[in-house]
Image (tube, helix red, strand yellow):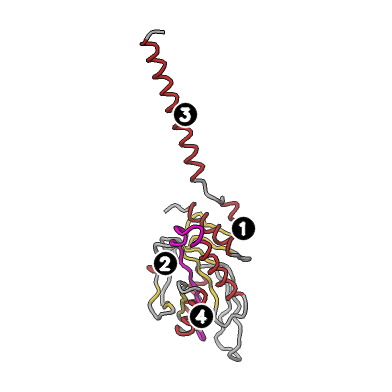
Amino acid sequence: MSSRMRGSVNKTVLILVAVIAAVVGLTFHKYMNKPSLTLEQLQQMGTVVFDKPRSFELKGMVDNKGQPFTKANLEGKWSLVYFGYTFCPDICPTTLGQLNQMDKLLKKDNPEMAEKMNYLMVTVDPRRDTVEKLNGYVPHFNPDFVGVTGNQKDIHNLTVQLNIPYTPVTDPEDEYYLVDHGANLAIINPRGDYHGFIRPPLDSDKLARVMVAVDELYQD
């Protein structure tokens, strides 16, 4: 074989190797960037992600430090928002405990995702849940958790926008009344829009897996 022919063969082989490498690289990239859960799997786990995130209004709210709480506080990170109240006997402390365990799991196994998360409890019982009451309750579960309150009208407006059913108590017969409310977690994306929700039953491992997948699927 002449040197010219050998050069031509070598060139062809190099081209084929480059093409194969490119195909393998694209396949590997696609595999490595595949979401850990599909939208269908998320639905099976009780998580609904909207085709188009929804804007909502947030006004008249303050946090458990007495500082104004606005949409700006929701931008830049994912937020899981739970609607509950400090006098709740069971589901509220259980849910906040699960969110705390989720936070611990992410900090251990996925610290990058942990840095992207906010956790909020908005009271559905502003009559009793003063700023001071929230500040003594919410951080008890996790010092980074934020409690939010406001007047009954603004809270009701927010629950309607985020599809959280609850029955306001305006004229209780005694101080030991209960407040009926939904237990979904609202998902707010880093742009501050209503992104979807997670239905109970909840557990910390499920919540961590769900939010990692939601973040992977997110198109900013």
Q: Earlier in the sequence, mark 4 or mark 2?
A: 2
Q: Position of residue 9 (x, y in %)?
A: 42, 16
Amino acid type, label 3: Ile
Q: Is residue 76 above or below residue 219?
A: below
Q: Is residue 112 above or below residue 149?
A: above
Amino acid type, label 1: Met
The stretch of residues the image draws in magenta is 106-128
Q: Position of residue 135 (x, y in %)?
A: 46, 81
Q: Give residue 137's mark.
A: 4
Residue 169 image-quadrant placement: bottom right
Question: Is residue 203 toward the left or the right of residue 18 in the image?
Answer: right
Q: Is residue 60 above or below residue 5?
A: below
Q: Give residue 2's mark.
A: none
The residue that disc 1 covers is 45
Secondary element at tag 3: helix
Q: Position of residue 118 (x, y in %)?
A: 46, 67
The residue under the point 58% across, 59% down is 47
Looking at this view, is 208 or 180 the one in front? Answer: 208
Q: Position of residue 3 (x, y in %)?
A: 36, 10
Looking at this view, is 108 or 62 the one in front? Answer: 108
Q: Give residue 20's mark.
A: 3
Specify few, some or many for label 3: CA neighbours under 10 Å numbering under 14, 14-19, or 20 or more.
few
Amino acid type, label 4: Tyr
Residue 102 image-quadrant placement: bottom right
Looking at this view, is 128 or 91 the one in front? Answer: 91
